[in-house]
Amino acid sequence: MQIISPKKQKMQGQLLYDYAIIRVVPRVEREEFINVGVIICGTKSGYLQAKLHLNESKLLTLDPEADVSMIKENLASFEKICQGSKGPIATMDKASRFRWLTAVRSSVIQTSRPHSGFSHNLDDTLARLFKEYVL
């Protein structure tokens, strides 16, 4: 008889995923940001999705001169890259796209460091993370 630890029992039937919080840093030199989305990747399941919401009033509180239309356009690129419909990066496999999107950079749109977890339903997990960290 094989004994399975409680931790491994919890993981059985669940999907391993990585996620990061998408942030807008309107004035990089000040390092102030607002959370605007979540990106989640389930490598083995082939799942890659981003959910975004830009609160323009919060953004303009941090920087009244922020280029809102440019920021919206760049955020839309996150979704297009996840869907595989934007440029040469879209030809990469989903895990590589996730790593490219979450690479450390000093720009107006940044992500947190990736975190990992287990989920039975990645759509539900994306919705939960979005509610916790963005809304």
Image (tube, rainbow, N blue to C red):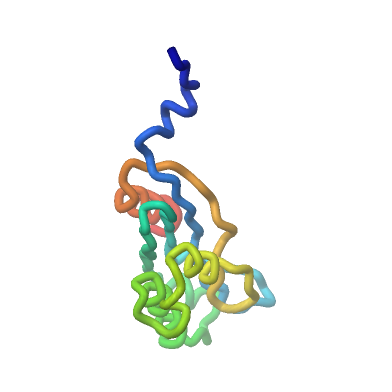
State whether residue 129 is above or below residue 64.
Answer: above
Q: Position of residue 117 (x, y in %)?
A: 47, 44
Q: Residue furthest top?
A: 1
Residue situated in front as seen by the camera: 4 or 42? 4
Q: Residue at x 46, y 73 (%)?
A: 92
User: Residue 36's quadrant in the figure?
Assistant: bottom left
Task: Judge whether residue 68 can be spotted in this image.
Answer: no
Q: Position of residue 79 (x, y in %)?
A: 37, 73
Q: Is residue 89 left or right of residue 85?
A: right
Q: Residue at x 56, y 78 (%)?
A: 108
State whether residue 10 is above or below residue 105.
Answer: above
User: Residue 37's quadrant in the figure?
Assistant: bottom left
Quadrant location of the C terminus in the rendered image: bottom left
Q: Residue furthest right?
A: 29
Residue situated in front as seen by the camera: 107 or 98? 98
Q: Residue furthest front?
A: 1
Q: Residue at x 36, y 75 (%)?
A: 84
Residue situated in front as seen by the camera: 106 or 4? 4
Q: Residue at x 48, y 65 (%)?
A: 98
Quadrant location of the N terminus in the rendered image: top left
Task: Judge whether residue 96 can be spotted in this image.
Answer: yes
Q: Position of residue 123 (x, y in %)?
A: 30, 53
User: Residue 42's quadrant in the figure?
Assistant: bottom left
Residue situated in front as seen by the camera: 18 or 105? 18
